Image: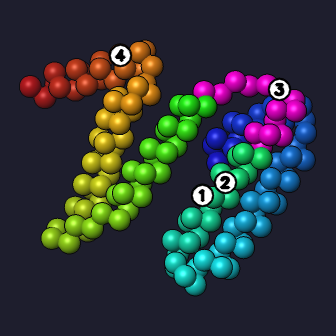
């Protein structure tokens, strides 16, 4: 929802808030339709999937509406890279089952491991800007320095 609102800023500045209404109606239709068809097949996970896809469609729609009022250059490569990596890591950790340990420990491992893998992927893929790498390096050095 945050990206949707950021992308919609030009519409807000131009006071063309009707586009928020249009995208919200389309999003609601998507959520209701997907819930009707998918909940019997997937259970409650279908509702979460419907919500995510609805906001994705709403964001793309708002991006096209906003371009009528202001051209904003987005770093498309970085947006696609971070989105795909987030989706793949989330899906991978969702299906990861560790039966030998308690549920809370599995959740902890997934959160910690997912965060570490995500950061590692961003570092390896060249996603981070040099200034961002310096900030992370500074934080890690400070954290490692406190531990020793």
Residue of label 4 = 134
Whole-Å distance between the Cαs marked 1 and 2?
A: 5 Å
Among the two numbered marks 1 and 4 on one chain, the one whose residue lies closer to the N terminus: 1
Q: Is residue 85 above or below residue 134?
A: below
Q: Of helix, strand and loop, which one carries label 3?
A: loop
Residue of label 1 = 52
Q: Which contiguous range is marked in magenta? A: 62-75
**Residue 12, can we see it?**
no
Tell me which residue sits at (55%, 82%) in the image: 41
Which numbered marker is on residue 13? none
Point out residue 141 in the picture as x, y percentages from the top left corner: 22, 20
Point out residue 146 in the picture as x, y percentages from the top left corner: 16, 25
Whole-Å distance between the Cαs marked 1 and 4?
A: 33 Å
Residue of label 3 = 70
Q: Of helix, strand and loop, which one carries label 4?
A: helix
Point out residue 17 in the picture as x, y percentages from the top left corner: 87, 43
The tally of labels here is 4
Residue of label 2 = 55
Q: Main secondary structure of the magenta part?
A: loop
Magenta stretch: includes residue 64: yes
Give left or right: position of 4 versus 43: right
Give left or right: position of 8 versus 145: right
Tell me which residue sits at (51%, 71%) in the image: 45
Whole-Å distance between the Cαs marked 2 and 4?
A: 33 Å
Among the two numbered marks 3 and 2 on one chain, the one whose residue lies closer to the N terminus: 2
């Amino acid at each position: 929802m945050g990206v949707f609102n950021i992308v919609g800023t030009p519409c807000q500045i131009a006071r063309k808030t009707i586009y928020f209404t249009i995208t919200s109606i389309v999003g609601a239709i998507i959520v209701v339709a997907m819930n009707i068809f998918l909940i019997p097949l997937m259970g409650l996970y279908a509702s979460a999937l419907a919500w995510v896809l609805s906001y994705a469609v709403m964001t793309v729609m708002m991006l096209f509406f906003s371009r009528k009022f202001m051209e904003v250059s987005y770093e498309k490569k970085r947006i696609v890279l971070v989105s795909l990596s987030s989706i793949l890591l989330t899906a991978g950790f969702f299906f990861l089952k560790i039966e030998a340990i308690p549920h809370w420990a599995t959740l902890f491992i997934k959160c910690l491991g997912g965060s570490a893998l995500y950061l590692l992927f961003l570092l390896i893929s060249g996603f981070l800007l040099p200034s961002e790498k310096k900030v992370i390096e500074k934080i890690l050095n400070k954290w490692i320095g406190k531990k020793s």
